[in-house]
Amino acid sequence: MPPVIDDKKCSKCGLCVEVCPVDVYFGSEKKSVPTVSYGEDCFFCSACVLECPADAIRLRYPLFAQPSYLSG
């Protein structure tokens, strides 16, 4: 599941594009809200979430990766 970017919070700094190890935001233009181009490649490392100064990115974890699912 791809990262979700809140357009209203995003400061368009591009840090998420720079830190993503798998180029989920490939092709995003500078000074604009990043585009999730390869959301299926995201492996939930949270680098973009942690780096975002505007707290504009959240990850939607698949069911099998959610703590409530793992604890039974």
Image (tube, helix red, strand yellow):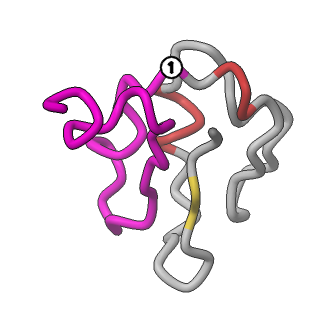
As displayed, is residue 10 above or below residue 15?
A: below
Q: For the magenta stretch, what is the residue range?
A: 43-72
Q: Counting other residues with Cα less than 10 Å from the Cα at mark 1, is it few (<14), some (14-19), or many (20 or more)?
A: some
Residue 56 shown left or right of residue 26 in the figure? left
Does residue 52 appear left or right of residue 23 in this picture?
left
Residue closer to the observer: 4 or 48: 4
Image height of 65 relative to 16, above or below: above
Q: Is residue 49 above or below residue 32?
A: above
Q: Decide which of 39, 10 is in the foreground and name it.
A: 39
Q: Residue furthest left?
A: 71
- Give the percent coordinates (x, y) of residue 39: 72, 34
Per the image, the residue denoted by label 1 is 43
Residue at screen point 64% across, 42% down: 2
Residue located farthest toward the bottom when viewing the structure as drawn: 8
Residue at coordinates 62% horizontally, 14% vertically from top-left? Answer: 22
In the rendering, at what x and y percent does residue 32 appear? 73, 63
Q: Is residue 54 left or right of residue 35?
A: left
* Membership of 44 in magenta stretch: yes
Q: At x 37% / y 23%, what residue is drawn?
A: 45
Q: Residue furthest front?
A: 72
Q: Quadrant of the C terminus?
A: top left
Q: Residue at x 59, y 36 (%)?
A: 17
Give the SS element for disc 1. loop
What's under tag 1, amino acid-wise? Answer: Phe
31 vs 35, left or right, is left
Q: Nearer the viewer, residue 53 or 58?
A: 58
- From the viewer's perspective, is residue 45 above or below residue 31? above
Q: Is residue 59 magenta?
A: yes
Where residue 55 appears, as percent x and y from the top left, is: 32, 65
Q: Can you give x and y, in whole percent of width and height, for residue 43 in the image?
A: 51, 19
